Image: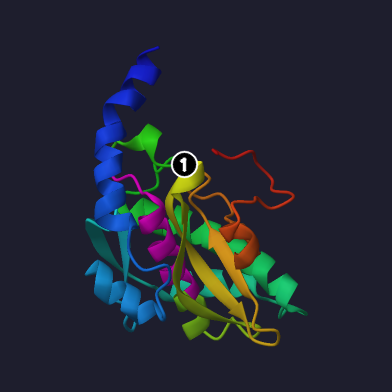
């Protein structure tokens, strides 16, 4: 019951956040346009942001070290043999980034979803998650690890008729087929591999057929 009262108490706050940060255009055309809109610095050189406090209201600039580059390279060695193989590597690398960079930014205690972490420090909603995942994938792309995909701007889904509020995800586009893929880390605690599935399926509010852990709905 205390948990239920807590959820009810934060609903007005969440509705305000939906209006303030969720009800924007359905998709950013490029990652750069997303950083501009969210008023967050784009990754540049070895510097990159980690956002938190819902809707990218706060961020911390971090530095990608040579040790970080070596660790990321290990996820892509030997080179992926297919686009599907590369997406698996990306998912694992994103989880590593959340753990490693989260410890530096103070977001390593982020828990799945939005509601349960409302009054907790340095939590992340889907806007933060989609921006951070985009950032991590851009780092992989810049280091030359993405040979089957390009990183696109975050995308949104919503359907108020069935009480589905705006929700954001990071996006990869498969270069050979042009298919867009959702890379969504919001469903799990920090450091867990994000869900990866075709963006069209994600937009229909479906979940991937399998994942190592159960997720918040």
The stretch drawn in magenta includes residue 125: yes
Q: Which residue is located at x 24 percent, y 54 percent? A: 20
Q: Can see residue 196?
A: no
Rate crowding at label 1 as few (under 14), some (14 to 19) or many (20 or more) other CA atoms within 10 Å. few
Q: Which residue is located at x 40 percent, y 12 percent? A: 1
Q: Depth check: 146 or 47 in front? A: 146
Q: Position of residue 166 (x, y in %)?
A: 41, 53
Q: Depth check: 15 or 41 in front? A: 15
The stretch of residues the image draws in magenta is: 121-137
Q: Residue furthest right?
A: 81
Q: Quadrant of the C terminus?
A: top right
Give the answer, above or below, for where 177 lies relative to 37.
Answer: below
Give the answer, above or below, for where 4 lies relative to 73.
Answer: above
Classify residue 92 as left or right of residue 2.
right
Q: Position of residue 33 (x, y in %)?
A: 32, 79
Q: Position of residue 24 (x, y in %)?
A: 33, 64
Which residue does the numbered mark 1 point to in the structure image? 163
């Amino acid at each position: 019951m205390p948990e239920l009262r807590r959820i009810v108490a934060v609903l007005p706050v969440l509705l305000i956040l939906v209006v303030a940060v969720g009800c924007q255009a359905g998709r950013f055309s490029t990652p750069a346009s997303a950083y501009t809109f969210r008023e967050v610095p784009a990754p540049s050189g070895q510097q990159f942001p980690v956002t938190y406090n819902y809707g990218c209201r706060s961020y911390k600039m971090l530095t990608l070290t040579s040790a970080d580059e070596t660790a990321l390279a290990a996820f892509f060695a030997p080179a992926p043999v297919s686009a599907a193989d590369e997406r698996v590597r990306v998912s694992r690398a994103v989880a590593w980034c959340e753990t490693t960079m989260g410890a530096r930014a103070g977001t390593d205690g982020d828990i799945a979803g939005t509601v349960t972490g409302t009054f907790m420090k340095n939590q992340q909603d889907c806007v933060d998650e989609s921006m951070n995942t985009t950032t991590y994938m851009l780092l992989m792309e810049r280091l030359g690890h993405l040979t089957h995909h390009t990183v696109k701007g975050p995308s949104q889904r919503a359907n108020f008729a069935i009480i589905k509020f705006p929700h954001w995800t990071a996006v990869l586009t498969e270069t050979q087929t042009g298919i867009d893929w959702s890379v969504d880390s919001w469903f799990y605690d920090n450091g867990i591999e994000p869900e990866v599935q075709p963006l069209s399926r994600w937009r229909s509010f479906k979940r991937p057929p399998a994942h190592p852990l159960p997720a918040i709905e």
